[in-house]
Amino acid sequence: MINKINNYKFSQEYFDTIQLYKKLHAEGTNKLSAEQTFAGYSLIPWGLKIKQIIDFTKSNSITDFGCGKALGHIKKIKINETIYQNFADYWNIEFVQLYDPGIREFDSYPTEKTDGVICTDVIEHIPNNDIQFFIEQLYSLTNKFLFVVIATIPATKFFEDGRNIHLTIKKEQEWNSIFKTFETKYPKIKTFLEFNN
């Protein structure tokens, strides 16, 4: 697992938070069953946009970083009345690498770079002190593009201790500023940033 860059590593809070997510994945929340909790639905509305980016960048491999239960990757999907085997079929790509530390079958940290990294509804779940390092990890795993969707409002789910599961809430301006720094550092990587408000 890559967890150290420039003498920084993820905080203990980050690893403690992963344990909380493992529990939510296994037990569900007060509103959702375990099967419905972090099922991977947040990717579905972005499927077409991601396909356009894949086509534009001539990409053939993707890492879904924070894929949840990855339903769109492992089950058939319907888009514009057409049934596809999964997102890889719809996007017409050869390889999808799935990663989510809260799901045993997807908890192996990515071992290779892919053409693109997608990260939908994940960053706001990361402790604030780990945000910069987390984003650095995303850029370190892609050759061509990074597609990120960030929620800028609190979630409707809570941890048992009462904290909102969206641990880091920032305005669009703040997120844009953070990512501008990374765009300067990684000029060959195209960055696509979207927001759920």
Image: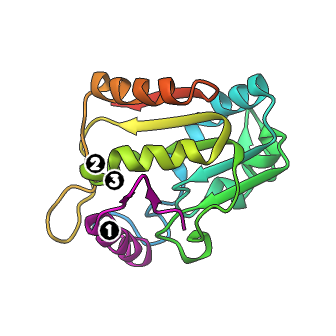
Q: Nearer the viewer, residue 195 or 97?
A: 97
User: Most extreme residue toward the front, as rendered?
Assistant: 7
Image quadrant containing the C terminus? top left
Q: CA distance from mark 1 to mark 2?
A: 12 Å
Residue 124 magenta: no
Identify which amino acid the numbered label 1 is placed on.
Thr
**Mark 3: secondary structure:** loop
Q: CA distance from mark 2 to mark 3?
A: 13 Å
User: Most extreme residue toward the left, as rendered?
Assistant: 162
State the residue at coordinates (46%, 63%): 3
Identify which amino acid the numbered label 2 is placed on.
Ala
State the residue at coordinates (64%, 59%): 98
Q: Quadrant of residue 50?
A: top right
From what the image shows, is residue 47 above or below residue 6? Answer: above
Relative to 66, is 181 on the left or the right? left
The spot of residue 147 in percent (x, y) is 56, 35
Q: Is residue 167 among what the camera can see?
A: no
- Around disc 2, counting alpha carbons within 10 Å, would you say few (fewer than 14), some (14 to 19), or many (20 or more)? some
Residue 3 magenta: yes
- Around disc 1, counting alpha carbons within 10 Å, would you say few (fewer than 14), some (14 to 19), or many (20 or more)? some
Q: Earlier in the sequence, mark 1 or mark 2?
A: 1
Q: Can you tell which of label 2 and label 3 is closer to the viewer?
A: 3
Residue interval drawn in magenta: 1-29
Q: Earlier in the sequence, mark 2 or mark 3?
A: 3
Is the C-beta separation of discs 1 and 2 under 8 Å? no
The spot of residue 160 in percent (x, y) is 20, 71
From what the image shows, is residue 186 above or below residue 1? Answer: above
Q: Which mark is residue 155?
A: 2
Give the residue number, with chain letter if any, for mark 3: 126
**Mark 2: secondary structure:** loop
State the residue at coordinates (14%, 64%): 162
Give the residue number, with chain letter if any, for mark 1: 29
